[in-house]
Image (tube, rainbow, N blue to C red):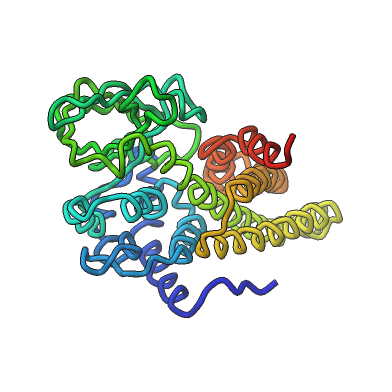
Amino acid sequence: MQRTLFEAEHEAFRQTVRAFMEAEVIPNHEQWERDGIVPREVWLKAGALGILGFMMPEEFGGGGANDFRYNVVLQEELTKAGASGVGFPLHTDLVSGYLLSYATEEQKQRWLPKFCTGEYITAIAMTEPGTGSDLQSIATTAIRGGDDFIVNGSKTFISNGINADLVIVAAKTDPDAGAMGVSLIMLERGMAGFERGRNLDKMGLKAQDTAELFFENVRVPATNLIGEAGHGFIYLMEKLPQERLTISVVAAAACRQMIDMTLDYVKSRKAFGKPIGSFQNSRFTLAELETEQRIAQVFVDRSVTELMAGTLSIEDAAAGKWWTTELQKRTADACVQLHGGYGYMSEYPISKAYLDTRIQTIYGGTTEIMKEIVGRSLGI
């Protein structure tokens, strides 16, 4: 089925991103996985090509193209390259939305130029050691003290956590107000009392720096408050559909990548004197995966259109997130099986894809939480 989502300018951007992947990322990603982090100079090179700030206004050095289809192109090309450790989408898909929607002009002047060049790497810190999907129960506080907020608490599983220069932190500015006491505050590298823990050792996404963050009496200027105090939970809810769509985009692209690599394998690998792809079980399995991927892609592309029109609902984003990521899990498992013993070998890309897949049904809201959201929308 022919995709109709993209126009000529998106495909031109795809060629730029693909060339960057081939020159700067693919030859080095295995080393970055061993290192557990992507070098900062890669961000600078991406920034110089306009890959990081395409959505930002031109006055701040961006491309002036606030069109989510460019985000989709970047996600798809990273996934196709197997570049699961390169944290650009967190920067371009998530943090960018908060800055464009809620930052003041003064904040934009301070942060956006270096956001676009890659001099500032960004992250968002919601999850805490004792709080996963329940954002209303966060314990990190930011109490007003004169012209500052005093931030105390900790966060965990923060992507880009080691590299990040700017971190949007969800904190309670009014600990007694429940969800309405949550605010978003930008912490900056070098602030006294802002410390990073270890670079967490993960099952997959090995090149992605994922860190613990600790805040001990960090004095943050009140001018770093994002939007209005007490509106943080609302802002998070407004942006979660886009975050979940981003994960769905990756899921559909990852299924496409795994199916393609498995097709190549079963056409060349022989058993009993003929390619294993010629056996009925292989054909039927791949036919099922191919069909489901095509259906997923249609839903994802429609969701992108809805997002840009401002009509993507929380329920549709949740439905797409859980279904596409569960499909990604099934696809990964089936493709490893079709690779046989070689699928269990680390040097085969399907092995890495299998490990990278597992987090997809967890972050951005677990499958169980997504089903709860959809279920509540049914009045049950």
Quarter assignment of residue 229: top left
Image x and y of residue 282, in percent? 79, 53
Q: Residue at x 41, y 72 (%)?
A: 13
Task: Name the side, left or right, on which 24 lies relative to 302.
Answer: left
Q: Position of residue 138 (x, y in %)?
A: 41, 24
Quadrant placement of the C terminus: top right
Residue 340 vertical position relative to residue 70 in the rendered view, above or below: above
Residue 283, above or below 353? below
Residue 226's x, y, as percent? Answer: 29, 43
Q: Is residue 375 above or below residue 285?
A: above
For this orientation, the residue located farthest to the right is: 280
Q: Nearer the viewer, residue 121 or 42?
A: 121
Where is residue 205 shown, x and y percent of the image? 46, 40
Which residue does the image show at 64% across and 33% down from the upper left? 368
Query: Residue 232 versus residue 250: which sits nearer the camera?
Result: 232
Residue depicted at 61% across the width and 34% down the height: 369
160 lies left or right of 75: left
Q: Quadrant of the N terminus?
A: bottom right
The extreme bottom residue here reads: 8
Q: Viewed as shown, does residue 261 lie left or right of 280? A: left
Q: Nearer the viewer, residue 165 or 288?
A: 165
